[in-house]
Amino acid sequence: MPRDVIVGIDAGTSLIKTVAFTRDGRQLGDFSLPNSYSTSAGGRVEQDMSRTWDDTAAVLRGLAAKVPDLGPRLAAVAVTGQGDGTWLIDDDGRPVAPALLWLDSRAARLVDEIRGSEHNTVLYRRTGSGLNACQQGPQLAWLQAHAPQTLSRAATVFHCKDWLYFLLTGKRATDPSEATFTCGDFRKRAFDSETARLIGIYELVRLFPEVVDGVTVTHPLGASAAAETGLPEGVPVSLGYVDVICNALGAGLYDPAPDVGCTIIGSTGMHMRLAPHADAVTLNEEATGYTMPFPVPGHYAQMQSNMAATLNIDWLLDLALGVLAAEGVTRSRADLIHRLDQQVLQAKPGEVLFHPFISDAGERGPFIAHEACAQFFGLRSHHRYGDLMRAVMEGLAFAARDCYAAMGALPREVRITGGAARSHALTAILGAALECNVRVCNRVEAGAGGAAMIAAVATGVYPHMRACAEDWVSPHLNKPQAPDTVLATRYARMFPTYLDGRLASRSLWKQLAALRTGGDHV
């Protein structure tokens, strides 16, 4: 039986997914389970590492049950997952504590101190990434100060996908993308001891694993993992890049044409540009965003990320559902979403201004403000629900423009993926706000697809990523949707007001934060 199937694993924040693809990128089947994590006081968000592996093994077994003869047909496995965070193991490979997730904000005060010091500019120039509480470096610094006993038992620090790769292959490793923005030098595509010193964790460099590029190196599936997953021992396993890079790869960021961007509209919003070499990377004055090696020699993905994208839409939907439920009317979120586009498109554009900073963790792109919060401007008595929802979508589009502007000129074309990419209203608003063509990627599992593409190149199915993208990505991009010129003109006039509003609100956010915590001064 030919080995003609590549499996991509995407261990996300919401779901742990596995997807089976043919060697030329056709999806055969998928299986997923909800991910589980806990939140507690002090900004703590943690995940049980052993359960994460058990769930991953379970989804692989579930995939095998859906795809006929998966084991005998399996050519390679690739793994990606949620980025940032801190996953610690001891000498024997056992977790020493629950993992800190990217949602964990306990290191926020430490980050504020560093960002307010002379170290921040130097750090940013080395990493190409703005320091944030979600990152492993600051989280390690927090553990060093507040939980040294945990670090004393640790031998290696991972990210989520690195932990799974270790259990699949026995190899302690991370990839170039996570090594760089965690505590590295983006030009070297590797960890950097001077960066560690600037963050205050020089003595913890011992915890960093080897950096392995999954595009060129694989390791065999181990016997224990084979027994737990039901997959054949020895099959090549590729360590994918972080999930956002794999999503961008699967959704079309890699393109020989210049000025192409990629936007992921999920729970968070991620906006990316591709730099063909290190000197093409644009670093902004506010020292925000990420620069990560891309799985193509010499290339980098620059990105700015909004903490909340569809979370803003979900909030307004749930508000309506709560009102209906109080009146004894039962509706599902799906019921409201079904009518959403029509409501938004019927509403007059630019009536209300919205800042989409609904996340409890504040905002990180293209500015960092832990106290940032969502806000409507310009409400009048005649405004209705459709006006508010249109303002929310316009706010997401302005936030995207804000992010792209921090990375240089606006792209001429943006590829869109993520759950909200199915909304015609949102994609039309986004294209007009960015004044560019929009192409929707209709591949549902772009992240797992991007990881599988890395494995396809690593195992010689394709000679290079460009050839792989022609088969795996191009057929899944819809035709370009040109922006509405009248709407684009209106949004271009409105965008400076959006910027003025967020700049003027920073002191207000701080005052509100102090009031919420019972502070008597700001």
Image: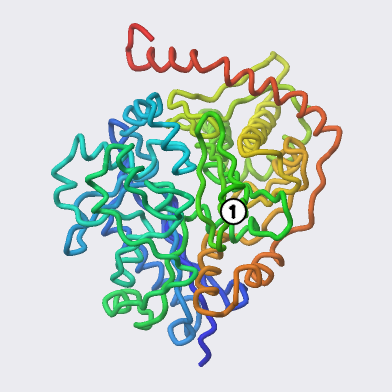
Q: Residue at x 38, y 12 (%)?
A: 515
Q: Nearer the viewer, residue 184 or 437?
A: 184
Q: Which residue is mark 1?
A: 277
Residue 25 shown left or right of residue 219 in the figure: right
Q: Tell me where residue 488 appears, x and y as whole percent.
A: 80, 34
Q: Quadrant of residue 398?
A: top right
Q: Tell me where residue 39 appears, x and y as whole percent.
A: 32, 39
Q: Tell me where residue 124 appears, x and y as whole percent.
A: 46, 37
Q: Residue at x 51, y 93 (%)?
A: 1
Q: How many residues crowd mark 1 within 10 Å: few (<14), some (14–19), many (20+)?
A: some
Q: Nearer the viewer, residue 354 or 218?
A: 218
Q: Residue at x 45, y 44 (%)?
A: 127
Q: Nearer the viewer, residue 182 or 84?
A: 182
The local secondary structure at tag 1 comes to loop
Residue 399 shown left or right of residue 42 in the figure: right
Q: Quadrant of residue 511?
A: top left
Residue 270 shown left or right of residue 137 in the figure: right
